[in-house]
Image (tube, grey):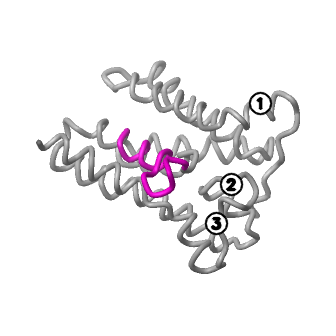
């Protein structure tokens, strides 16, 4: 019963579509009709409103932090189950017919909860790659891959399988971006 409650609450928290809600409330627009149609922060930036994009990013991180931190301190044996449930909630939200975001901001929140070093490693890798290549998708994919690579080479005893699963899931959510990157059709993202 406890496990079912943790999975359910984590999923429901993760499934709150902040990008959709913020653009609907403040811009009176449906984010799914803008840019890529994705509900995440990168697409929220395409609305032309940086405050909406930044707020979407922060809320997508926080919706992971709240349940995962709670579980970490009260039921530590379920931290990876809660983390995965939050992520699945974001990518496949019940409220939007299971069509959600790509999960990067939510994953950042998860990383900071599991290990602050992982969160900092992800962000520094993402920023470095973004400033070199200007592709948000490429930066996200490689920053996601750096976590299991770091664990493999420098840490023992960590749940590396979880981080490989997360890489596979984020790769899946970015499959269209990967095709565009291969075909040199991916658009660069301007965040400043």
What separation in Å lies between label 2 and label 1 (alpha carbons)? 17 Å
How dense is the environment of label 3, judged by Cα within 10 Å: few (below 14), some, or many (20 and up)?
many
**Residue 91 higher or lower than 26, as above or below:** above
Question: Quarter of the image holding residue 132?
Answer: top right
How dense is the environment of label 2, judged by Cα within 10 Å: few (below 14), some, or many (20 and up)?
some
Q: Measured from the top left, where is residue 104 in percent x and y? A: 55, 46
Q: Is residue 142 left or right of residue 58?
A: right
What is the magenta range? 84-99
How dense is the environment of label 1, judged by Cα within 10 Å: few (below 14), some, or many (20 and up)?
few
What separation in Å lies between label 2 and label 3 (alpha carbons)? 14 Å
Residue at the spot 82% in from the left edge and 27% down from the top edge:
182
Q: Measured from the top left, where is residue 74 in percent x and y? A: 15, 49
Which sits in the foreground, 156 or 14?
Answer: 14
Question: Quarter of the image holding residue 88?
Answer: top left
Q: Is residue 108 left or right of residue 185?
A: left
**Residue 159 higher or lower than 90, as above or below:** above
Circle 3 or circle 1, nearest the eye: 1
What separation in Å lies between label 3 and label 1 (alpha carbons)? 25 Å
Q: Residue at label 3?
A: 53
Q: Earlier in the sequence, mark 3 or mark 1?
A: 3
Q: Residue at label 1?
A: 179
């Amino acid at each position: 019963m406890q496990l079912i409650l943790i999975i359910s609450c984590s999923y429901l928290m993760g499934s709150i579509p902040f990008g959709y809600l913020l653009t609907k409330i403040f811009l009176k627009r449906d984010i799914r009709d803008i840019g890529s149609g994705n509900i995440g922060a990168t697409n929220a930036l395409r609305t032309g409103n940086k405050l909406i994009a930044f707020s979407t990013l922060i809320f997508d991180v926080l919706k992971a932090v709240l349940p995962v931190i709670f579980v970490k301190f009260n039921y530590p044996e379920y931290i990876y189950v809660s983390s995965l449930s939050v992520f699945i909630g974001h990518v496949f939200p019940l409220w939007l017919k299971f069509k959600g975001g790509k999960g990067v901001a939510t994953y950042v929140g998860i990383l900071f909860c599991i290990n602050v070093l992982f969160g900092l490693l992800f962000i520094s890798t993402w920023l470095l790659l973004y400033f070199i290549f200007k592709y948000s998708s490429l930066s996200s994919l490689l920053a996601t891959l750096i976590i299991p690579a770091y664990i493999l080479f420098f840490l023992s005893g960590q749940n590396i399988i979880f981080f490989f699963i997360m890489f596979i899931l984020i790769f899946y959510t970015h499959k269209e971006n990967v095709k565009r990157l291969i075909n040199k059709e991916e658009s660069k993202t301007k965040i400043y």
